[in-house]
Amino acid sequence: MSYCVNCGVELEPSLTECPLCNTPVINPKELYHQKKTSPYPRERGQVDVVKKTDLSILICIVLGAASLSCLALNFLVFPGSLWSLFIVGACLILFVLALPAVIYTRLPVYISLLFDGVAVGFYLFLISLNTSSDEWFFSLALPIVALTTILVEVFALLLRTFSFSYIAMAAYFFAEAALLCVGIELLIRHYTGRSLRPGWSAIVLTVCAVIVILLITVLSRRRLRDAVRRRLHF
C-alpha cells in the first residue's frame, strides 16, 4: 500500500499518477537502480607534453633573436649609445638560468652556479661599457660577484657533503649571510677609501652568530632536535 507524497491519498499499485492531484508516482527502488548518466565525456582529452629539445630550441631562438635584433637597431637606427648591451646581457643571464633546467639537465650544480656567477659578472661588465669609468666594476662589482659565487658554491658543497636537514641548512644560510654582509661592507669601505672595519655588518654578524649557535645547539641535542622537528612538522 502506497500513498501520494503530495496529498496523501491512498494509491492503487497500478497507478502511475495520483488521481486527485496528478502527482507522478515514483518507486524509490526504481530510482536507486536507475543508471545515472554523467554530464561529462568519458574520454579525456590529452595534450602532448612539450619535449625538452623543442623547448630548448625555442628558448635559444627567442633569446638569440632578441639579442640580434636589439644589436641591429642599436647600430643601424639608434647609434647614440650602447643600450643594446643591456638586452644582450639580460638574454645571456636568462640563457644561463635555463641551461641546467631545460637545455642540459645533467649539468653539475657546481658548474651551473659558476656559470650563473660568470653571467652576472659579464652583465655588469657590459653595463660598465656605458659608464664613464669602469673602476667601480673592477674594484667593487666584480669582487662582490666573486664573493657571492664562492659562498653559494660552498653552500652547495655543504649540503651535498653533510647530512641534509632543514635545521642544518638554516645554520649554513645564516653563517654565509653574515660573511656576505661583512665582505660587502669591507669591499665598499675599500672602494670609498674608508677604514676597513665592520659597521652595520657587525650587527648582522652578531644576530646571525646567535642564530647559528642556537641551531648548532639544537642539532647537537637529539631530544631537542626531535622536539623542534615535531613542532615545525619537518
Image (cartoon, grey):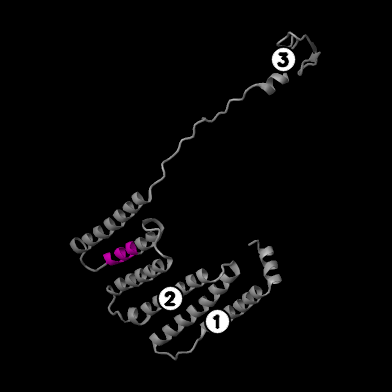
Type of the residue with mark 2:
Ile
Answer with left or right where residue 113 lies relative to residue 216: left
Mark before the other along the chain sequence, 2 or 3: 3
Q: Distance between the residues labelled 1 and 3?
A: 82 Å
Marks 1 and 3 close (CB-CB < 8 Å) = no
The residue labelled by disc 2 is: 150
Up the image or down, 140 lies above or below 48; here it is below
Q: How crowded is mark 1: few (under 14 residues within 10 Å), some or many (20 or more)?
A: many
Q: Distance between the residues labelled 2 and 1?
A: 18 Å
Type of the residue with mark 1:
Leu
The residue lying furthest to the left in this view is 76
For the stretch drawn in magenta, what is the main secondary structure?
A: helix
Please tell me whether residue 86 belongs to the stretch shown in magenta: yes
Q: Position of residue 122 (x, y in %)?
A: 32, 71
Marks 2 and 3 close (CB-CB < 8 Å) = no
SS label for mark 1: helix
Q: Residue at x 49, y 34 (%)?
A: 44
